[in-house]
Amino acid sequence: MMRARSAPFLSSMLPALCLVLAVAAAVAGILPTHLDGAGLVYIVYYYWVMHRPDVVQRFYAVAAGLCMDALLPSPFGLHTLLLLIIHEATLSLRSVILSYSFLLLWAGAAVVLAVAAFIAALLSHQPHWPLLAAQVLLTALVFPLLATLFARKSIRA
């Protein structure tokens, strides 16, 4: 009985937990140097807005963004703005992307990541384009692994 009642609660808490872990990893700097910590948060957020828009509201973007803004060396408000842009763009394209294959979902994650990195580089006045391109590419390559992990965990929850 208890398991049947707790499954929806756990399923609704999984996106928040994943986002908190991604923000913590980005802020703590425990990721390999070739991965962009903020980019990882962006693709985690993109995945959950795409698959659980009923659970992941704009509040998640504001909360995660403010934590990142306060703890990362970047202009204040940058990550909040980018997460809100990702939220709106993902919701507007959600039905199109989910009606096709995983490759379109992955391409969408890569585009979201590239646009966010480009905007962040311009607004923080630190455009180092070759390094930025390498980080975007390598972080986008992590998306299928994260998507597989999240899909399995959300099915079990």
Image: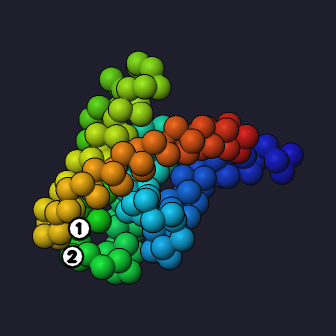
Nearer-the-camera pick, 87 or 76: 76
**What is the number of the mark on residue 78?**
1
**Element under label 2?**
loop
Q: Residues within 10 Å of mark 1 (few under 14, many from 20)?
A: some
Percent x, y for residue 2? 84, 51
| Residue 85 showing in the rendered view | no
Q: Which quarter of the figure has residue 38?
A: bottom left
Percent x, y for residue 123? 14, 66
In the displayed structure image, the side of residue 53 where residue 157 appears, left or right: right
**What is the number of the mark on residue 75?**
2
Depicted 29 relative to depicted 84: above or below: below
Q: Residue at x 35, y 32 (%)?
A: 107
Residue projecting furthest to the top: 100
Tag 1–tag 2 contact (CB < 8 Å): yes
Q: Which quarter of the figure has residue 27?
A: bottom left
Coloring applied to the structure: rainbow
**Which three-letter amino acid code belongs to the residue tagged 1?**
Leu
Percent x, y for residue 130? 24, 54
The residues tagged by marks 1 and 2 sit, at their Cα atoms, a distance apart of 6 Å
Nearer-the-camera pick, 50 or 4: 50
Q: Residue at x 45, y 65 (%)?
A: 33
Nearer-the-camera pick, 9 or 65: 65
**Which three-letter amino acid code belongs to the residue tagged 2?**
Pro
| Residue 139 showing in the rendered view | yes
Nearer-the-camera pick, 74 or 62: 74
In the displayed structure image, the side of residue 110 where residue 128 appears, left or right: left
Q: Residue at x 42, y 48 (%)?
A: 138
In the displayed structure image, the side of residue 29 where residue 2 appears, left or right: right
Residue projecting furthest to the front: 130
Q: Residue at x 48, y 37 (%)?
A: 51
Please state, as top left, top right, bottom left or bottom right, where the C terminus lies in the image.
top right
Percent x, y for residue 34? 43, 59
